[in-house]
Amino acid sequence: MSLERVRGAPYDSRDLNTNGALMAFLSDTLARVKPSPTVAVTQLANELKAQGKDVIGLGAGEPDFDTPDHIKEAAIAAIHAGKTKYTAPDGIIELKQAICAKFKRENGLDYEPAQISVSTGGKQVLYNAFMATLNPGDEVIIPAPYWVSYPDMVKLGQGEPVIVEGKPELGYKITPEMLEAAITPKTKWFLFNSPSNPTGAGYTWDELKAITEVLMRHPHVWVMTDDMYEHLAYDGFEFCTPAQVEPALYDRTLTCNGVSKAYAMTGWRIGYAGGPKELIAAMRKIQSQSTTNPCSISQWAAVEALTGPQDFLGEWVAVFKRRRNLVVSALNAIEGIECPTPEGAFYVYPSIAGLLGKSSAGGTVIEDDEAFAKALLEETGVAVVFGAAFGLSPNFRISYATSDAALEEACKRIAGFCGALV
């Protein structure tokens, strides 16, 4: 079948598969990206559970707490009040005002509503920004380990991800010298995430100050922050964001956040950002031609999340810290695994360097972290995400945003799996 027929005249979809023309029909953009590994692991775990298999899913970065009642009640009230129509493409004014107040209250950043963008989840905020700014060949510096979607979103915008590896001996963080060496005349963005997904590593004020000093020497480089885990910090670690640490970066910083993690609102899909008006307007144009606007009901729930009671956050953080300590202790007791203690978020990112080359009881050779994760799932029912998906191996990521009982059983199974390696 010719490509012209695929594009024009009527065809039977079966002909596409039979003649191999489907690949010609699809966009070349698909070749630049891969499906999200974290989503894939979670989906596989759910499928296995549906088949009746005993699976413990530790792949999803999703709090097991329910959305607080006062937030749910605000959504119900919005429904009853008929607030179910289209809204402005990038958010209702009430939510933008609440976000401005949050940025001022918690981060010392002054924004006005025209500088705020609200999107369908934090991912769309970043995606809109890349689509609005990247041209072919533009470079985006991304510290690794990174959230799995960062490089692929850059590629979708026809940009080039420039990966800078934060080694374990550096606490999975990069140094100012490493950032300086990565900057070129083509660099458009530096994408910054602290506390980090997948490592939980957090940059102190002084560490971030040294990073911002590098950025001050390169005025063509803009800063995009992913502050989604801002409220999940432990052991006295104090969160800070680049424009807060270096106010002179304010005019070229997009400060991104959302309600998904801190407020257990992953399914509500509300992310937001503050930045220069011109950039926000460009992102609004992109969004107006994609989702139009975030869910109206979710927006009213987010207003309540940001302006209502916050006392539960401290209670949740205490639970996450207990779970973190449980997992770190259990994993470090396993020979061949080294698990740093993270400063924030709800992930650990242990190394399996000491297990490489061994064989599992089921006969799998642990050649890399992907083989480890696959064998672990098949032989024990524990679903984790392999480190290569985050740009640094040999590691795996565990989300401890689940029950203590599930974590204890999962760690027991991991210990048994590793203990049986030969």
Image: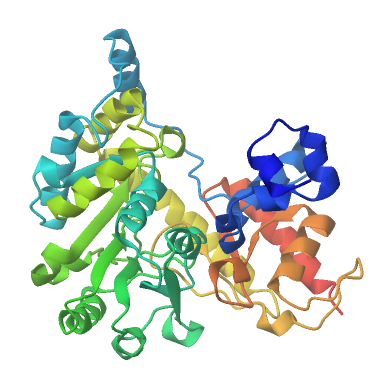
Asked whether residue 56 is in view, the answer is no
| Quadrant that contains the N terminus | top right
The chosen color scheme is rainbow
**In the figure, is residue 17 to the left or right of 204?**
right
The residue at 48%/84% (across/down) is 167
Between 294 and 307, the one nearer to me in the picture: 294
Q: How many marks?
A: 0
Between 159 and 189, the one nearer to me in the picture: 159
Find residue 159 and report its horizontal and vertical position in percent: 42, 67
Find residue 311 and report its horizontal and vertical position in percent: 26, 40
The residue at 36%/54% (across/down) is 131
Which image quadrant is residue 272 in?
top left
| Quadrant that contains the C terminus | bottom right
The residue at 75%/40% (across/down) is 47
Asked whether residue 84 is in view, the answer is yes
The residue at 71%/68% (across/down) is 370
Between 160 and 13, the one nearer to me in the picture: 13
Find residue 92 and report its horizontal and vertical position in percent: 21, 29
Find residue 79 and report its horizontal and vertical position in percent: 33, 13
Which image quadrant is residue 337 in?
bottom right
**In the figure, is residue 370 to the left or right of 241?**
right
